[in-house]
Structure formats: C-alpha cells, structure tokens
Image: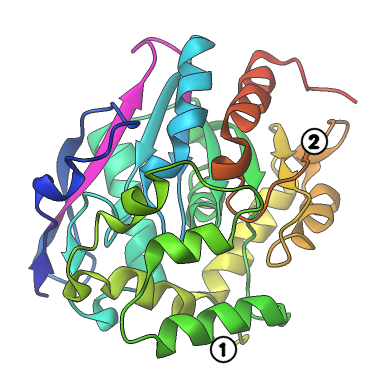
C-alpha cells in the first residue's frame, strides 16, 4: 500500500481552525502497513467526551463551530480525520480503501490509542456509517449517540437519485473540486476561506483517492461485502437502550428520509425530542454548526432526554 501525506504547509492559510493536530499510527487490516491518523481536541481534558466523525469529502475542519460550542459547554470534543482525508495519511489507490478498513482504523485510534470510554458519538455522512458500526460492535464504550444526516445502509434499499448523481460526479471528474462539492451540499453561503480549507488536504490530485473511493464503498446491493456487518449493527442498535438522538437538517435530499427511520427503529430514540435544524443542507455543521453544537451539549447534559 503506497501511502501519501499532505504537507503541513498546505494548512498554513487556515485561520479559523486553531486546534493543533495530534497523530497516532494505527494498523491496517490484512496489510503490514500502519497509517498515521490525525485528531484534534477542544475543551477540558476531564469533560464528557464527544467524538466527532466527519464524512465525504470533508475533514475535521467541518466541526470547527461544533467544537467551539462543546468546549464552551465544558465538554471534550475530539474530532478525527478519516484515513484519506485532512491531515491523516492518504492511501494512493482507490482499491486501498474498504468499509471494513475505515471502521478498523477509527476503532484502533479511538479505543486502542485514545482509550475513549463513556463516549457520545456525533456522526454525519460517513461519520455515521463508520460510527454506528462502532456503536453496534462496541456498545459498552458509548453513552449516547447523535446521528446527523447519516444512516447505516445495507443495500436492501436503493439510494436516492441525488446520491447516485453525486457518485457519478465523483467518478467522472478528472480532478475533484472538493470545496465546490462541499458548497453544493450547503444551504447557506460558506464563509470566506472555507472552500480553500476543504481543498487544503488535496493540493495534488494524487492525494484524492479517499474522496474518490468513498461513494463506491456505500452498500447499494444486499451482496455488498459490508452488508452482513451492517445488518448485525442494526440488530444491536435497534435494541440498545441508551439515548439515541436524531438531529437532521431540513434540507438534505440524500439522507433526509433516514431521519424518521432511525427515530422509529432505535429503542434509545423513544421519548426524545429530535430537533430539525432549519435552513441547513447535507453539511449541517457548516450551515448551522454552533446550533448543532448546542443541541449536542444539551443532549449530553440531559436537557433533551424527553419530549
């Protein structure tokens, strides 16, 4: 596996993400190579832990406003750059990326290296696809879940047309304009410098195998390699009795239909007030990050444990 790494100088111009990166090497399933993963922390070290997992094609910068809100509320926000994104190592080949590897990489970082316990998961997009698998497979590590514009597909139901259009765009584009892709998933204008910050991890097209790979890893048929594990996670999650909050935006055509499904399927979702963030698109952290951070902080405090 050929591993690439974005030069740190590519991030020098980012002014609104003050969190210094921390790094750890984690093993790769079915390979001899380890990969270096980046993670960031905000808030008191002894505060309640909130694990922030981003998706395609972003990195932890997406959570900057959420991290500030959580830190202000006395919580320890830990954001992770998925392998292939942000400051984490970037396998050079699309074929080096598998769903199982991404779950294993995050598992190794947050459990084996950081030894996180009593965790609140906030997962969006692929952050939910990976994070919900981890909750289903390691339920005792988690105190509660916030699912935001995400799901846990098994391939038993077709993806929406907008998702297929996104996948075809990613597959066909000679060079991915990541900042533009993120902007297209927002409902509010991005702040100056944000598009460049999303582009920063990919100063060379050779570094873009991660964003190119992820759409093809979403299970779209029941025969997908990840289907069995995702079905097993669904079974465990649906009977898991710890609080499960569904905090979706009101303007995401890709994951929007999953909100009611999660609310109905998860035992831990019953009796909760599930907020809908108005005027926000797929990347609700970009559109309404401070609001989402306040929602999560209130949920951790127990303010939203009943409707």
Mark in the foreground, 1 or 2: 2
Residue occupying the point 15% across, 71% down: 31
Of 18 and 212, which appears nearest the observer? 18
Report the residue at 80% width, 35% height from top: 275
Q: Is residue 70 magenta?
A: no
User: Where residue 4 sits in the image (x, y, percent)?
Assistant: 11, 65
Seen from the viewer's position, the closer of residues 106 and 191 is 191
- Image location of residue 5, percent across then percent down: 11, 59
Residue 129 in sight: no
* 32 to the left or right of 124: left
Assess disc 1: are there few (<14), some (14-19) or many (≥20) residues with their C-alpha within 10 Å of its C-alpha.
few
Quarter of the image for residue 58 reads bottom left
> Is 117 displayed left or right of 218 in the figure?
left
Q: CA distance from mark 1 to mark 2?
A: 34 Å
Asked if residue 13 shows in the view, the reply is yes
Quadrant position of the N terminus in the picture? bottom left
Q: Is residue 37 left or right of residue 127?
A: left
What is the x, y in percent for residue 3?
Answer: 11, 67
| Residue 290 falls in image quadrant | top right
Image location (x, y in percent) of residue 280 = 69, 47
- Tell whether 194 sits left or right of 238: left
* Relative to 122, residue 214 above or below: below
Q: Which residue is mark 2?
A: 275
Q: Is residue 43 magenta?
A: yes
Q: Which residue is mark 1?
A: 223
SS assignment at label 2: loop
Q: Which segment is the magenta one?
A: 35-50
Q: Nearer the viewer, residue 44 or 211?
A: 211
């Amino acid at each position: 596996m050929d591993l690439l790494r974005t030069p740190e100088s590519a991030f020098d111009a980012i002014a609104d993400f003050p969190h210094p990166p921390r790094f750890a090497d984690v093993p790769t399933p079915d390979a001899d190579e380890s990969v270096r993963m980046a993670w960031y922390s905000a808030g008191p070290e002894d505060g309640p832990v909130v694990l922030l997992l981003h998706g395609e094609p972003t990195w932890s910068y997406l959570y900057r406003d959420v991290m500030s809100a959580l830190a202000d509320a006395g919580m320890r926000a830990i954001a992770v750059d998925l392998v292939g994104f942000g400051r984490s190592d970037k396998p050079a080949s699309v074929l080096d990326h598998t769903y199982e590897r991404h779950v294993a990489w995050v598992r190794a970082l947050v459990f084996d290296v950081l030894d996180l316990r009593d965790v609140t998961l906030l997962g969006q997009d692929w952050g939910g696809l990976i994070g919900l698998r981890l909750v289903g497979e390691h339920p005792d590590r988690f105190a509660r879940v916030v699912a935001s514009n995400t799901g846990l597909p098994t391939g038993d139901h077709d993806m929406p047309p907008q998702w297929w259009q996104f996948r075809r765009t990613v597959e066909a584009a000679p060079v991915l304009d990541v900042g533009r892709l993120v902007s297209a998933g927002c409902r509010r204008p991005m702040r100056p410098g944000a598009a460049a910050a999303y582009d920063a991890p990919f100063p060379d097209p050779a570094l873009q195998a991660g964003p190119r790979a992820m759409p093809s890893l979403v299970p779209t048929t029941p025969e997908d390699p990840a289907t069995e594990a995702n079905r097993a996670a669904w079974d465990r999650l649906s009977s898991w009795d710890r609080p499960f909050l569904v905090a979706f935006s009101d303007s995401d055509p890709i994951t929007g239909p999953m909100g009611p499904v999660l609310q109905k399927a998860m035992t831990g979702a019953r009796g909760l007030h599930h907020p809908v963030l108005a005027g926000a698109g797929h990347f609700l952290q970009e559109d309404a990050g401070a609001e989402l951070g306040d929602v999560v902080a209130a949920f951790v405090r127990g303010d939203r444990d009943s409707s």
